[in-house]
Image (tube, rainbow, N blue to C red):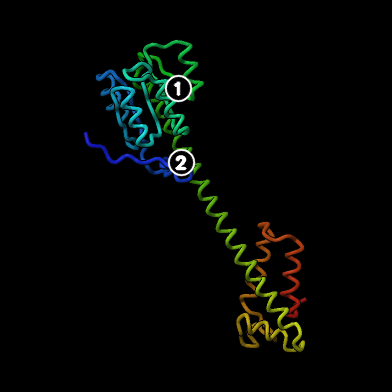
Amino acid sequence: MNFPPLRKFSTDLTKNPALPFHEPIQILLAEDDDALREILQEYLNKPGRVIRSHKDGLEAINALKGAFFDLVITDLMMPGTDGIQILREVKGSHPESIVIIMTGYASLDTAIEAIRGGAYDYIPKPFRLDELEVVIGNACEKINLLRENRRLLQRLKETMAELEELRRTWEKHFSQFYDTYWTVSEEPEDSEMEIVLNQINPVPPDYHGEKGLQPEVLDGLERLVRFRKEGFLSEDEFLSLKNTLLKKLDIP
């Protein structure tokens, strides 16, 4: 059977291949019973899932070393290595992956060991297929929620970076404004504001009042208010910048 290429795993959670919410859930199935493995492969193969099946523990571990799987379903007792070792391998390299262990040798000790090792669930054989599907369906829902949380976290980081860049841009803008202010502070009072306004963006004298109130300045005042609300400016910084703008425009 030909499968689509496996996804490589990244240690950066924000770039984790499980992150995209729309991608199918990658499932690894390890079961040494050929008949049961084929039944599970067919029954669990539903839309939104890609299932890779392996006949023993060594095959499963080799597959885990080459790709990331959102969900691992493994038998406990298999040739080569057992389900507990597969659980350790998964949690050692991809701790966010979900592991479900099936076993026909159920005991309290192995169940405790599996849960302590990070297994999502421990299912004794024999079991009904619909019961297994309920467990796997819940696991898939959890995987999708984790993906969505990571996607939102990534969006939040990007938004914060954009806000920080905007803050730096406006710091530079107001720094240039102050430099211009002090450069012309020794000019005659009557021409001082004209020089400042002309250096920013000249407009006709009757555009907004006697000396012209540029849209850029109005926009600057609006942004000052928003920056104060968003916490980028302290109250003192806000008042100082606002008073400077209004004073130079002869606005009380």
Q: Nearer the viewer, residue 116 or 197?
A: 116
- Seen in the image, is 64 located left or right of residue 172? left
- Please say if 227 is above or below 138: below
Q: Which mark is residue 121?
A: 1
Where residue 230 sits: x, y (%)?
Answer: 66, 57
Dividing the picture into quarters, in which one does residue 163 lie? bottom right
For the image, the number of numbered tags is 2
Where residue 183 sits: x, y (%)?
Answer: 71, 81
Where residue 248 sits: x, y (%)?
Answer: 73, 79
Q: Nearer the viewer, residue 64 or 201?
A: 64
- Please say if 27 is above or below 20: above
Q: Which mark is residue 11?
A: 2
Q: What residue is shown at x 48% (from left), y 17% (from top)? A: 113
Element carrying mark 1 = strand
Distance, label 2 to label 1, CA atoms, is 25 Å
- Decide which of tag 2 and tag 1 comes sooner along the chain: 2
For badge 2, the amino acid type reads Thr
- Please say if 163 is above or below 25: below
Q: Which one is in front in this view, the residue at disc 2 or the one at disc 1?
A: 2
Q: What residue is shown at x 65% (from left), y 66% (from top)? A: 171
For badge 1, the amino acid type reads Asp
Q: Which mark is residue 226?
A: none
